[in-house]
Image (cartoon, rainbow, N blue to C red):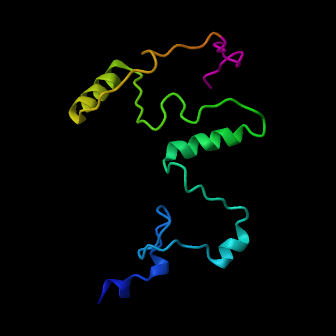
Amino acid sequence: MRWREIVKENSAYDSAAGISPTGKKGKFHKHHDDVIPGVTRYPDTPAHYYNMYRFGVHMARSPSDQDMSPAGPTANEMVTLAYSQADLDIIKNSAKAFGFKGSQVTKHGSREPNDTYVQSPVANWSKK
């Protein structure tokens, strides 16, 4: 049996790439076109999940005007965080093994902001 007999063009559509195995762009089935209003593609934008995330965050604050960088403080870079020295040691060991050069963005150690409420709202805590 030949490959093209096993997989039909319309069933092997690659939605991530937007093309079928033959190199043709796919189209929505009429049923989907009828029930999903206002679908807009952005083919000239980077296809990276971080960009999609930042776009969503910006939309969540709309329609108000806002000043927001599309890149943010870490852009499309891998980010790690260490709550303890053991976490930091693990991260450094793996980064060394992979040849990754990191650049520290925030200070080590977690500190509560001054406006954090530190007293329990429960008056008399009962262990019952």
Taking the spot 65% from the left edge, 18% from the top edge, the residue there is 125
Magenta region includes residue 29:
no
Question: What is the residue that sits farthest to the left in this orientation?
Answer: 97
Image quadrant in which you'd find residue 68: top right
Magenta region includes residue 126:
yes
Q: Main secondary structure of the magenta part?
A: loop
Image quadrant in which you'd find residue 40: bottom right
Q: Is residue 13 above or below residue 43?
A: below
Q: Position of residue 126 (x, y in %)?
A: 65, 21
Q: Is residue 112 above or below residue 33?
A: above
Where does the N terminus fall, quadrant-wise? bottom left
Taking the spot 70% from the left edge, 19% from the top edge, the residue there is 122
Q: Position of residue 75 (x, y in %)?
A: 49, 34
Residue stretch in magenta = 115-128
Taking the spot 72% from the left edge, 73% from the top edge, the residue there is 34
15 left or right of 7?
A: right
40 left or right of 23?
A: right
